[in-house]
Amino acid sequence: MASPLNPSRSTSIARLESLIETLRGENGCPWDKKQTPDTMARYLVEEVYELVDAIVSKDAAAVCEEAGDVLFQLLFIANLYRESGRFCLKDVVDYNVDKMIRRHPHVFGDVSAKTPEQVSENWDTIKLKERGGAERHSVLGSIPQGLPALLRAAMVSERAAKTGFDWDDISEVMAKAMEEWGEFAAEINHSRFESDSGRATMEFGDILFTMVNVARFAGIHPESALILSIQKFEKRFAYMEAKSIEAGQDIASLSFQEMHILWDEAKDKVG
């Protein structure tokens, strides 16, 4: 069957643009024709997280597929704005290229930056100038409120540390984590006798935020680390479920000891 897409659109991006125009066209897909930037934003977020999962899993084939899905969503959104006359893909590319050249003066200009830290400092200075320079903005103000809490905590921690508000080394922040754990344990014991557990919730949050700082000092991204840990748990639990079915049992019917025997077996078999 011949492709319904415009044969003159030969580049990879142009093929995707042609596909989207066909889907949005007169004889296109009812679902695609109904979409708006607001509705597509949700799908974009979902696809980005699927891409992150694939990257963390180091599955190149999955990364290729999910990167394509993210690219499709981005181009679809750009096309919606082109249809409304707001901007086109060329505007997006031109704006970004100009911004990246402006923010890399150590590559395209005469500014010196020999380390990633110097590059980051220059980047922040240039961003401030772009916003007018004189008006002060909180260094935390541009972090999106809608980010998942762990990812946002990592960004807040990193931005605050750049101002010098930080521990001297990882041993200090690990000691702080132990201190926060002690405060949480004390609050949990206290909450057994009171109905209000709000303080315990806050103390637990302090533990999580401090551990995000531990991860930063260790050069670990907490979101990626947690994704790996969740994936490991899922694989082991799936193994337990499969073994239970093989034995003609539902996993929920197993005793605590039986579950842990399977768990230890799963650790050996699936890692």
Image: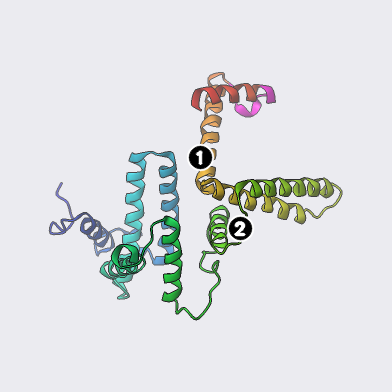
Q: Indicate the position of residue 217 as horizontal and vertical percent values.
A: 56, 49
Quick one: 264 or 169, which is closer to the camera?
169
Q: Residue at x 33, y 45 (%)?
A: 65
Up/down of 247 relative to 70, above or below? above
The residue under label 1 is 228
Residue 250: within the magenta? yes
Which residue is nearer to you in this view: 228 or 77? 228
- Residue labelled with disc 2: 166
Neighbor class of circle 2 (other Cα within 10 Å; few <14, some 14-19, many 20+) is some
Residue 223 lies in magenta, yes or no? no
SS of the residue under disc 1? helix
Quarter of the view holding residue 185 = top right
Residue furthest top in the image:
247
- Locate residue 130 relative to residue 160 in the image: left or right: left
Q: Which numbered tag is attached to residue 128? A: none
Which mark sits nearer the N-terminus, 2 or 1? Answer: 2
Residue 104 horizontal/vertical position (percent):
34, 64
Amino acid type of the residue that numbered disc 2 sits on in the rendered structure: Asp
Rounded to the nearest angstrom, the CA distance separating label 2 from label 1 is 27 Å
Query: Can you tell which of label 2 and label 1 is closer to the viewer?
Result: 2
Stretch of the chain drawn in magenta? 249-257
Q: Secondary structure at mark 2?
A: loop
Q: Amino acid at mark 1?
A: Leu
| Residue depicted at 34% across the width and 63% down the height | 106
Would residue 271 appear left or right of 113 to someone viewing this image? right
The correct choice, above or below, for 6 with respect to 185 in the image is below
* Residue drawn at the location 53% of the way across and 20% of the way down: 246
In terms of depth relative to the viewer, which is nearer, 169 or 178?
169
Counting from the top left corner in percent of width and height, residue 119 is at 41, 61
Neighbour tally class for label 1: few under 14, some 14-19, many 20 plus, Cα within 10 Å = some
